[in-house]
Image (cartoon, rainbow, N blue to C red):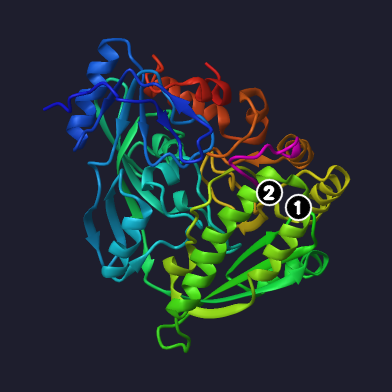
Amino acid sequence: MTARPVKPSRRWTNWAGNQTCHPAEVATPGSTEEVAAVVRDAARRGLGVKPVGTGHSFTAIATTDGVQLRLDGLRGVVHADAVTGRVRVLGGTPLHVLNPALQALGLALPNLGDIDRQTVTGAISTGTHGTGLRFQGIASAVRGLTLVLADGSVLACSQEVEPEVFQAARVGLGALGVVTEVELQCVPAFRLHAREFGADLHDVLDRLDDDLAAHDHVDMHWFPLTDRVLVKHNDRVGPDAPGDPLPAWRAWLDDDFLSNRLYEATNRAATRFPRIVPPLNTVSARLLGAREYTDDSWRVFVAERAVRFRESEYAVPRTHARDVVLAVRDWLERHRPPLTFPLELRFTGADDVWLSTGYERENAYIAMHQYHRMDDAGAFAAFEEIVAEHDGRPHWGKLHTLDAERLQGLYPRFDDFRAVRDRLDPGRVFANDYLRRVLGD
């Protein structure tokens, strides 16, 4: 059985519009067997293969001039065990499809990021992490994987079977094979009590350790060229705890009109008149007022992001968060680039996944964004220089300039990962320019 490649009608572009490629062919397999057939055929003809999800990575991790694999046909829950919480999911399942499916089973992922457009394979392969010092990224919930390898064979791995492949493939960057199924360790469905409020940046940094100890999930949005921060405290509550979801009108006002429709208009204005950015940021910080509500975990974790942007995000040791934020603030005040998006500050606990940014250390994640129509005026480069002084590990799906030599010093198991890659894909069927830079050849 084969999934017939077809000539693409136009170039492929990612969500942010900053990465493009021209695949020689596009394949739309509907099963692991069809993926294997496509890979075998491409390898025989000397073509590279690259699976692509929804294009939410800002790097070129999914680009190819060979065969592009679109996994839209691999969606849905394959098996669920309500007793153990183990769920097998097809790799092309978007998180916005998976989350309500898990809810219907009485289950949930332990942690989530704030965007749910990614496929489950894309999210784990690039190290999507969420926030919460007592929790880890999504890849830490993975208990098994099914991969199609470069020769078209199919390999199942777990902690017990092919454990080194499993450790490498949980955050595999698409370098080891095509992940067609994922087994996830879920938890009973839970609700979150959300409290959001404005605060002063220096006050936030002064009480940071206390906040991280007191709350399950802490997320902060600092508006550049101001000292205003939108703080989000999300705490797990029992099924009988009081609290209601946001009223429909308030959800529409905050999350649709203010955060997307009006925000798009103000960003377009800032593109034409960059000098208005500081007052716009001040107004934006004030418009997103205090609110408090309780809802299903995934409804609280996830935010609608319709305004397009580019992003660079680095993980630094948690105890370095204050120094990094203040250094970034100092640079922004001196150079005053027209950054219209808030910088985001989040936190996670340590994990044991080889290429996870959280490998063996608690992290603070600092993310810099810019509207997709505007230049960052050197802010991203300056940000990289600052985090480099604090052993910053870049998010694999977000903009960075690091290469294999630098990354080798940041990840203790980097060479172990490359050894697994050499074994599984010696001919580099799954390579592209991004992987050649970050992993070497």
Residue 354 appears left or right of 206: left
Q: Which residue is mark 2?
A: 270
Q: Which quadrant does the N terminus fall into?
A: top left
Front position in the image: 441 or 155: 441
Q: Is residue 244 above or below residue 127?
A: below
Q: Residue 276, labelled with which disc?
A: 1
SS at badge 1: helix
SS at badge 2: helix
Q: Which amino acid type corresponds to the residue marked 1 in the rendered image?
A: Ile
Q: Is residue 195 above or below residue 404?
A: below
- Tag 2: Cα neighbours inside 10 Å, few (<14), some, or many (≥20)? many
CA gap between label 2 and label 1 equals: 6 Å
Residue 134 appears left or right of 230: left
- Tag 1: Cα neighbours inside 10 Å, few (<14), some, or many (≥20)? some
Q: Position of residue 131 (x, y in %)?
A: 57, 60
Q: Is residue 208 above or below residue 152?
A: below
Q: Residue 9, labelled with which disc?
A: none
Name the residue rendered at 41%, 88% in the picture: 240
Q: Residue furthest top?
A: 45
Residue range in magenta is 368-379
Q: Which amino acid type corresponds to the residue marked 2 in the rendered image?
A: Ala
